[in-house]
Amino acid sequence: MRKPWRIVFLFLVALLSPMVMGTAAAATLADVQQEAVRGGYRLINSDELRDMLNRHPAGVVLVDTRQEWEYAAGHISGAVNFPMEPTWLARLTKRGELQQFLGQDREKHIVFY
């Protein structure tokens, strides 16, 4: 005999999983710009990044946020890997881990891709 609470629980898990897990939706440029303003960081383009790397490569930390297997398949030379899903839940749960990963040096520019 099936227990009704299990069916309800599984239904709720199936129903709420996308909200809890923070399914990634395609962000528009406007979304990204708003997030940058809210987060207090600056967006740069590839030309600006190239100039920063040419002027002072030791002053830039490149962080590849793709999964480990994607990083292993190919990445920008000198980049470090910090796998993170593009969701608010991932950012929230990995906040302390990211701070520890990046260290205390506040003089470097951190570039996520």
Image (cartoon, helix red, strand yellow):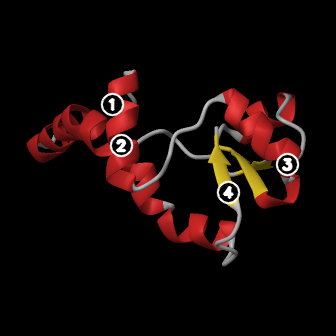
Q: Amino acid at mark 4?
A: His
Instruction: Say whether residue 26 is left or right of residue 7.
Output: right
Placement of 45 over or under 43, stated as above or below: above
Query: Of callouts 1 and 4, which one flags the residue occurring earlier in the amino acid sequence?
Result: 1
Which residue position is annotated with label 4?
A: 109
Q: Are marks 3 and 1 in contact (CB under 8 Å)?
A: no
Report the front residue among 63 and 40: 40
Mark 1 vs mark 4, CA separation in Å: 22 Å
Query: Residue at (38%, 54%) from the top-left corner?
Result: 39
Is 89 positioned to the left or the right of 85 in the image? left
State if disc 1 and disc 2 touch (CB < 8 Å): yes
Q: Position of residue 5 (x, y in %)?
A: 11, 46
Query: Which of the two residues, 112 or 83, is positioned nearer the viewer here?
Result: 112
Work out how far the residue at label 2 is from the one at label 3, CA to CA, in angstroms. Answer: 28 Å
Alpha carbon of mark 4 to alpha carbon of mark 2: how far? 18 Å
Q: Secondary structure at mark 2?
A: helix
Circle 4: element type = strand
Question: Which quadrant does the C terminus fall into?
Answer: top right
- Tag in front: 4 or 2: 4
**Nearest to viewer (mark 2 / mark 3):** 3
Give me the C-alpha separation between circle 2 and circle 1.
6 Å
Label 2 belongs to which residue? 35
State how far apart marks 4 and 3 are (Cα).
12 Å
Local packing at callout 3 (Cα closer than 10 Å; few below 14, some 14-19, many 20+) is few
Q: Which residue is tagged 3?
A: 55
**Residue placed most toward the observer, 54 or 78:** 54
- Direction from residue 37 to residue 84 in the image, left or right: right
